[in-house]
Amino acid sequence: MPLTRKTAFIDLSTRQVEVQEVPSGLRRDYLGGRGLNMYYLKHLTPRGADPFDARNPLIFGAGLLTGVLGGRSNVSGRSPESGYLGDSNVGGYFGAELAGTGYSHLVITGKSDRPVYLYIENEKISFMDAAHLWGRNTAETQTMISDELGDDRVKTMCIGPAGENKVRFACIITGPKNAAGRTGLGALMGSKQLKAVAVRGNRPFSIEDPTGYIDLLRATSQKTAGSKWGKALGLYGTPILFKNANTRGWTSYRYHQRTTVGELGEPLHAENLYSKMSKGSVSCFGCPIHCRHRFEIKEGKFKGTRGEGPEYASIASLGPTLGNLNLESVVYLSELCNQYGIDTISGGNYLGYAFTLFEKGIISREDVGYALQWGDHDAIERLMTDTVYRRNFGNVVAEGSFAPARLSPEAGKHMMTIKNVSIEMTDERAAKAFGFGLAVATRGTCHMRSRPSTDVVQYPRELLNNFYGADVGEDFKDYRGKARMVWWHELFNAVMDSVGICRFAGVFSSINALGYLDICELLKKTVGFDLTDKDLYALGERIYTTERLFINGEGISRKDDTLPDLYYDAPVPDGPTQGEHIDREKFEEMLDDYYQLHGWDSNGVPTPATVNRLRIDESFQEEYRHAG
């Protein structure tokens, strides 16, 4: 049964492994995946330590139902990009294979004295030499490990050269393009000289009600894949979101100089990607949607480039954010990021920052070694490669949000981050819930912590008011109720990540997708948890409040729950959202509402009453001795 999966505590310095069962109370309070990851992170991370301190843990965690229902897992640690909370949810097949070994979580501390990779076959954990893998890209690494182990069913998460060189926004890759992306955990992995984690598991397991589960699985699969949203994802994948963002005015062009490129953006629409390059689609483990598209560039400069993706975020980050509207170039650059092991969102935006500095004359050709002209593919690729290998000015860009410390004071004024994490590929001056969600996200600038996309879908407002339990405003430009929407999705997404179900299968753009009651039924049929929707609300609160306590301990408070000055001071210059910006006074009112909903004080710190109500102290004190 999934409840019997264990946690392995692995010390790379001493090469010692301690295996522990997960206490039943801890399972019920945090489930698995992101929830249990946050519990371990909160208790095992030295407060105030440098991100590359060997004592910091790197945590892999499969969702409670991963391997039974879906394949999602989370990777967590202290973020090299921000210095604070690092966490990323990832799909593919690694999570399900990890669950098949009998482990649900790996807590990795220390630092190896030479490159290694971990090989976990069922419950056996081996330390394998990785000297021959160091310097290899992510595709080569995964192929070489499979060949070396003589098993093509081994699933691997690995870093590329970016992680090895501790580029602060390096990611971890499994398969062709599934990335544990934001917050730079690939750099944390590289600092430990851990090239990869390879898993192979075929341990049998049982579930509470097999017959009932099969019937429920059929129903939930139909609900997920049969919706308009599910069908659109199955046909085009997430690139369908770019057209909406561009035509309605919340994309980023030339590092937020504009919020739309109008008809000039049509070459990047999903229909063109599909008709010109599609080679079919595949799914992550157990998913009925099949939104992972395979591509091949069939002609031109990048002919022969093959891979999976790119996702909407990659298209927008490596396209309009850099002034690049060439589809083939964008797809090629996305694939290059996957091979290097670099996050496409942060990568595109830190490069965009460099291009902005060049445009404004703050840095010169002499500083960089070549000109940085918007939309110039060769300059983008060259700077990206220099960044990965920390060559010349790329060594500055590789520092991400810390780059201004190596530049002039004037350069620092143009860096846009939230809690030290780069701004994203969208511009939220018009979509108030989107902007607010970025500002308060526990891991820094993050659309995946909340992102109430239902606010920009054409639902009747009365229907949304009923769904969220209060007035959520006239439209996406209205401030009313946006704090509630963000709060609702924060709790729900925390539950989904802890169960192991993809964000797109649940309430995201569709209020008719999988919700709390569906999750209750799934948990009952699989592990016998008899929970209500209110229980899951509380569980989401517990996870999110644990995250908040972690960043509070690092000095994060109300002063950090904010947006770059651009959002407040510079109205959108043109397009369908012309004149929109964030009103500072109304933003502060949203913060007050948001803190009240969470049960945090006016400075954004959970109150003792909230901590006690969520039994966080009880979990910490009674379970930590066993699970730490």
Image (spheres, rainbow, N blue to C red):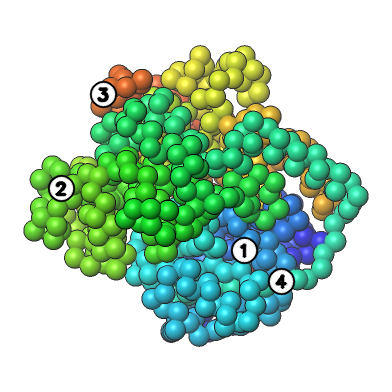
Cα gap from disc 3 to disc 1, whole angstroms: 44 Å
* Earlier sequence position, callout 2 versus callout 3: 2
3D distance between C-alphas at marks 2 and 4? 50 Å
Question: Mark 3 falls on what kind of element?
Answer: loop
Q: Is residue 129 visible?
A: yes
Name which quarter of the figure residue 3 lies in.
Answer: bottom right
Percent coordinates x, y for residue 312 in the rendering: 46, 42
Callout 1 secondary element:
helix
Element carrying mark 2: helix
Q: Is residue 516 left or right of residue 435?
A: right
Q: CA distance from mark 3 to mark 4?
A: 55 Å
Q: Amino acid at mark 2?
A: Phe
Mark linked to residue 201:
4
Look at mark 1 in the image and give the residue it sits on. 94
Contact? badges 3 and 4 (CB < 8 Å): no
- The earlier-in-sequence mark between 4 and 1 is 1
Q: Amino acid at mark 1?
A: Phe
Q: Nearer the viewer, residue 106 or 512?
A: 512
Local packing at callout 4 (Cα closer than 10 Å; few below 14, some 14-19, many 20+) is many
What residue is shown at x 82% (from left), y 64% (from top)?
Answer: 205
* Mark nearer the N terminus (3 vs 1): 1
Chain-order first, disc 2 or disc 4: 4
Q: Which residue is mark 2?
A: 358
Residue 145 image offset from top left, x and y in percent: 55, 78
Q: Amino acid at mark 3?
A: Pro
Q: Which of the two residues, 609 or 11, is positioned nearer the viewer here? A: 11
Decide: is 245 above or below 342. Answer: above
Question: Where's residue 340, x and y in %?
Answer: 39, 64
Q: CA distance from mark 2 to mark 3?
A: 22 Å
- Looking at the image, is mark 3 or mark 4 earlier in the sequence? 4
The residue labelled by disc 3 is 573
